[in-house]
Image: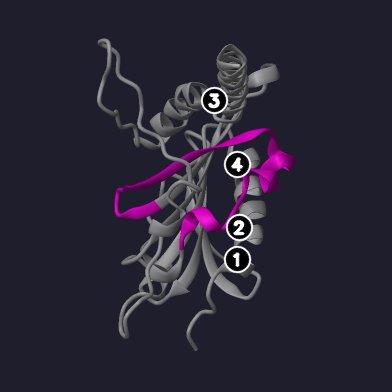
Amino acid sequence: MHFGLLLEDIRSRKKKREIRCREIEVLTIMHPMNLLCKVAISALALLGLVGCSATEHGSAEPRVESSQQQKSSGSVEPAPGESLSLSVDPCELLSVEELKPHGEFIDAGRRELGGARSCVYQRSARGGHQGFVVALNVRDSQGIESVADAGGKVTESAVGERNAVQSANMSVGDCTVAMEIDDSSRIDVSVNGLPSVDVTCPIAEDVARLVEPRLPDVPS
């Protein structure tokens, strides 16, 4: 009798171990963080936004957190008199699925550098395609009138009924569409890493059209 119970206990533990092993395999497939880090560092290098986490075994890896991991930390409710842009989380405005017409993208994570709260998306270079970056940059203290000439030209435009300007860097091919949030803040849709503004500007314009309806109304 005692031997039968012991045997049953051994079988039960073995079954639990097998289930746990399968769970670990599934989690490994669903969260390929090593691959994400390797691809994201190339994306962030194009924007000068590379950072490293603590190292192990003598090697450093970029610390890249997805927008889903930090979703709740990207915006706050603005107080009276503060920029309306504080209510905007750039990582809630766009998904990698919506970028599929322009290639296969990964969410390379959230950044807060250079005076902007940013969300970065990297197009994969697999299959012989050229990799490039799409970034959404919320600037809480800079309106569209402060968009700098990036070496090409700055032109006034509109996205929907929202005031915007476009800045194109003819020498390196980068393009930015900056949309008004209020008088003192804006959101930049930037495309970097392709050789010609003839390619990057249409992508930036397309992404801006996706993002614009999700922004708060401009105060009248």
Which corner quadrant of the image does residue 54 belong to? top left
Task: Look at 63% across and 69% down and name the residue there.
Answer: 213
Classify mark 3: helix, strand or loop. loop
Q: Earlier in the sequence, mark 2 or mark 4?
A: 4
Task: Look at 57% across and 11% down and name the residue there.
Answer: 3
Indicate whether 149 appears above or below 81.
above
Please report contact status of discs 3 and 1: CB closer than 8 Å, yes or no: no
Please report contact status of discs 3 and 4: CB closer than 8 Å, yes or no: no
The Cα–Cα distance between marks 3 and 1, rounded to whole angstroms, is: 32 Å
Please report contact status of discs 4 and 1: CB closer than 8 Å, yes or no: no
Q: Earlier in the sequence, mark 4 or mark 1?
A: 4
According to the image, label 4 marks what residue?
A: 200
Picture coordinates of residue 18, whole percent (x, y): 61, 18
54 magenta-colored: no
The Cα–Cα distance between marks 3 and 4, rounded to whole angstroms, is: 29 Å
Instruction: Give the crowd class for mark 2: few <14, some 14-19, many >=20 residues within 10 Å.
Output: many
Residue furthest bottom as drawn: 220
Picture coordinates of residue 25, whole percent (x, y): 60, 21
Which amino acid type is shown beneath numbered disc 4? Thr
Question: Residues in magenta?
Answer: 89-117
The Cα–Cα distance between marks 2 and 4, rounded to whole angstroms, is: 12 Å
Classify mark 4: helix, strand or loop. helix
Please report contact status of discs 1 and 2: CB closer than 8 Å, yes or no: yes
Q: Earlier in the sequence, mark 3 or mark 1?
A: 3
Please report contact status of discs 2 and 3: CB closer than 8 Å, yes or no: no
